[in-house]
Image (cartoon, grey):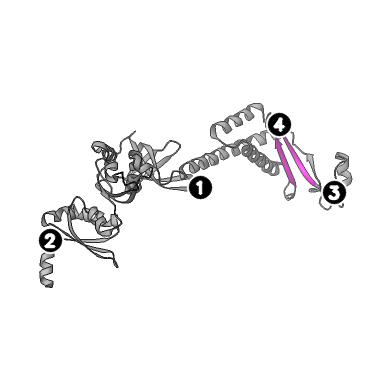
Amino acid sequence: MNQEFIEALKEIVKEKGISGDLLFTTIEDALVAAYKKNYIGHGVSNQNVKVTMNRENGEIHVYSQKSIVDNVVDDVSEISLEDAKEIDPNYNIGDIVNIEVTPRKFGRVAAQAAKQVVIQRIKEEERRIIYNDFVEKEDDIITGTVIRKDKNNILVNLGKTEAVLGPNEQIPGEKYNFNDKLKLYIVEVKNTTKGAQIVISRTHPGLIKRLFELEVPEVFDGTVDIKSIAREAGSRTKIAVHSNDENVDPMGACVGPKGVRVQNIVNELKSEKIDIIKWSKLPEEYIANALSPAKVLDVTLDEEIKFAQIVVDDSQLSLAIGKEGQNVRLAAKLTGWKIDIKSKSQSDIKDEKID
C-alpha cells in the first residue's frame, strides 16, 4: 500500500459518507483472510493472525498472535513464558504475543484484497445510506423525474436512486414523458439484498393528504385535520375535513382564496375532481355532507350494521348516486357506512305500502 492509496481511501470516505474507521477495519479483516489463504498451509486453521494498516502511509504489518502458557501444547497458537520474555521481559502468563510474520511480497496480495473489499464496502454503504434516507420518507411525498417507460412501468429518478412506478400506481389516462416532474407518494421502503426497493404511487390516498399539507398551512400545522379520504384516482376524490379552531373554516382553508389552493392540487393530479366536505361526529350529518353536491332530505341509520337509508328530492337522485354510482360509492368509502339512496317519490310509495 502507498500514500496514494490512503489518500484515495480518505477521499472515498469524504465523498460517500462512509466511516473511515469502519473502512480500515474491514480492509484489515480482508487482509487477514488474504494472508491465511495465501500463506498458511492446509490444515493449519488455528493460527491467530492480526493485520495492521497505518492510516497515514498505508504501511502493512502481519502478526501471528500466540498466547503465553506454562506448557506449550500447540506451538502454532501458543508460546512459552521463557520464549516470550526474550521478546519482552514484561510479558506474563495469559498475555498475547504479536510476532511479525509479514511476507516479503505481501503488498500485491494486500492491494488486490483491499481493492475488492473497498468496492464491496462502498456498495454496501451506499445501499445503507439510501435505505436510511428513504425509510424516513415513508408515507411522505417526493418529487421524481421520469426517465423512461419500460413496457407498462415508468422508471423514475428520485435523486440518489431510481424507482418503478407500476401500472396500478399510475393515474389512469395520465401521460408520462421523459423529464416530466412528478409528485409521488412513498408507500413503502424495503431493504433487500440489492439495496432499497422504494414503492411509489400516484394513486394512493396518502398523496392527496400530503398535497393538501403542502398547499394548506392550516392542514400542515394541524389547525385543520383531514379525517378521511376516499379516492378513485384520475377521476374523483372526497376528503372530510375538521377544524380544531372554531374561528377557522376547514373547507374555506382547503379551497383557499379564489379556490387557488385546491386548484393547485387539481392541476398536479391532471384535473382529478376533489370534493371537500365537512366532517361531523354525528353520522347523519357526516353522511349527508359526504353525498355533496347532492342535497339530502332525510337520513335513517341502522347503527348495528352501519347502514344508512338516504332520501333525496327526485331531481337530486342522479346527482346523489353519481355517474356509474361513483358519488355514493365514494361517500360510503369516506364514511365507512353502507348507503342506499331513494328519491322522495320512491320513499313515499314505500311509506304508503307500509300504511
Q: Earlier in the sequence, mark 1 or mark 4?
A: 4
Spatial separation of the CA atoms under disc 3 and disc 2: 100 Å
**What's under tag 2, amino acid-wise?**
Lys
Position of residue 323 relative to residue 177, above or below, is: below
Please give the residue where the numbered disc 1 appears in the rendered image: 193
Query: Of callouts 4 and 2, which one flags the residue occurring earlier in the amino acid sequence?
Result: 4
Please provide the residue range marked out in magenta: 46-66
Q: Is residue 211 magenta?
A: no
Marks 1 and 2 sit apart, C-alpha to C-alpha, by 62 Å
Disc ID at residue 344: 2
Residue type at tag 4: Glu
Across and down, in percent, residue 217 comes to 35, 39
Mark 1–mark 3 Cα distance, whole angstroms, equals: 46 Å
Image-based side of 171 in relation to 353, left or right: right
Tell me where residue 157 sits by quadrant. top left
Foreground residue among 186 and 216: 216
First in sequence: mark 3 vs mark 2: 3
Which residue position holds label 4?
A: 59
Q: Residues within 10 Å of mark 3 (few under 14, many from 20)?
A: few
Numbered disc in front, either 3 or 4: 3
Residue 91 makes an appearance in the image:
yes
Task: Report how far apart the C-alphas of labels 3 and 4 lie in the structure.
Answer: 31 Å
Quadrant that contains the N terminus: top right
Q: Where is residue 334 shown, x and y percent of the image?
A: 29, 54
